[in-house]
Image (cartoon, helix red, strand yellow):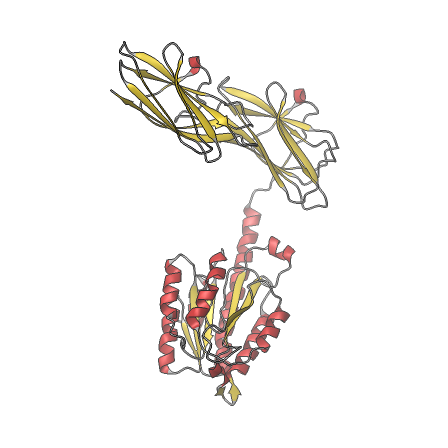
Amino acid sequence: MTMKCSIKTLLKTVQVPLLIFAFLIGFPPFQSPAQAQSESSGANILFILDASGSMRAKVENKEKIAIAKEVLTNLIKELPEGVKVGLEVYGHRSKGDCNDIQVMVPVGQGDKETLIKQIQSMQPKGETPIAKSLEIAREQLKEAEQETTVVLVSDGKESCKGDPCALIKTLREQGIKVTVHVVGFGVTSEEKQQLTCIAEAGGGKYFTAQNANQLKGALTEVKKEVIEKVEAKAEVKKEEKAKAPQMAILPKGGDSLEAAVPLPLGEYLADRIVPKNTQEYYAVTVKAGQTLILKFRTPATAHPYAGATIYNEDKNSVSSDVIIGDTGALKTIGWTTNSTKEAYTFYLGVGNIYNPNAKGTVYSISLEDNFDANTSSDVGDDFEKALQITPGKYKGFLAGDQGDDYKDFYLITLKANEKVSVKVTPPANVQYKVSIWDQDRVNVAEKTSANPGAIARVSWAAPSESEQEVHLLIEPNRVPKNSASLPYTMEVSVEP
């Protein structure tokens, strides 16, 4: 396998700073905040510089540290935009100290000039704590979401009783995506054995560099792979953008609720300003048990205002919110229907009372199927509409303060002397009340969650008479603010 191929193999995995120069591929370095937001795909490079005392040894009449500084400095200067770089160093502050490890520049938090200045300041003094260096880098690697490649360039093996091979295996077993390439710079056969083990444990390749040209060649291969990776990601992103469907333009809405324009579900871009204290109106069909969700986000302009309102069939406002001067802010409003009808026409109003509604605001309209008990609708909210069930486990939904679905009635048939038990588990922030009603619709048993999230259990035994139909009622006792739909599970059992 060629050096280039092996580095490609390394670039396929992720995260773990190894000694000397660790290249982490996955983020974009040397970017302004604006660039970082617009281009999330790139490369992460972490240099871990070996500044142990042995780096003072000479190769071709020149100290190893001087060669490393020169090669690394030139490499950094040639790196393209879209690559984030960091620097970790060990052995540079004191002799005989296995804790002498320092993250000089976190990945992506320094420019090229700062990084080079830190590299040039290093003076070899101490030990070679390879395993400890990797341990310190662990948290930074765990935070990296994109693919990362680490390249270690070391002139010796572990000198602080650590086991870097085992540590790297552990990191990979923990799910940290990391590929490690190692360059042994002027090492002995014994030192090469451990460094090779590190590369193999990290799923990477070991390279030998006995002089400045070989070190430059190895790191140049890495740089080439980094550039190719950045360019490949940019090309893929460009192709994906070209293939992606363009966001629909929000059509002109009606000037009143009566003139509301039917609007399909989807995401829409407002290409115009809606005047202050004015709304454009749209109509959406919602089935019983569904939650209508309207999200809107302001554009990246100065002090944008945006607002939205949901109106029910009676044309009354039921949910509304506004963004006041916040760039890129997101608001969500919603409403959950009940079982009064099979389907409803709800209305959406776009605009706000404070300022013109910003051009470039994005509106997203969607529906969530919050149906009850494995049906395709909402369970009835009175005795006549109760859903007939048998013992078992059921999932249901009730509305919070943004909805009409406040009661779910179930019906179960009991024989004489049979006992029905009901267990209802609410969400963590909700209290539910569970009640049992006999055939005369008399409340014979009731239980309310002791606190939000607490399970409510209630039981009742039928009298020694003939078979009778019993109603079970689930209803909220206390719900959180700005909540549209709240799930619950209900377990029903019957005993003789």
Looking at the picture, how far across and down is residue 213, in whole percent?
Answer: 50, 81
Rendered position, 270 above or below 128: above
Rendered-image quadrant of the N terminus: bottom left
Q: Nearer the viewer, residue 305 or 265?
A: 305
Rendered position, 286 above or below 191: above
Q: Which quadrant holds residue 303? A: top right
Rendered position, 447 above or below 123: above
Rendered-image quadrant of the C terminus: top left
Q: Please report the residue visible at 26 percent of the width from the left and 15 percent of the height from the top.
A: 417
Most extreme residue toward the bottom is 61
Looking at the picture, how far across and down is residue 355, in whole percent?
Answer: 74, 35
Q: Please report the residue visible at 35 percent of the width from the left and 15 percent of the height from the top.
A: 470
Q: Is residue 448 visible?
A: yes
Most extreme residue toward the left is 496
| Marker count (numbered) | 0
Most extreme residue toward the front is 450
Q: Please report the residue visible at 50 percent of the width from the left and 61 percent of the height from the top.
A: 140
Q: Nearer the viewer, residue 77 or 167?
A: 167
Q: Which quadrant holds residue 256? A: top right
Looking at the picture, how far across and down is residue 328, in whole percent?
Answer: 64, 44
Looking at the picture, how far across and down is residue 145, in whole percent?
Answer: 49, 55
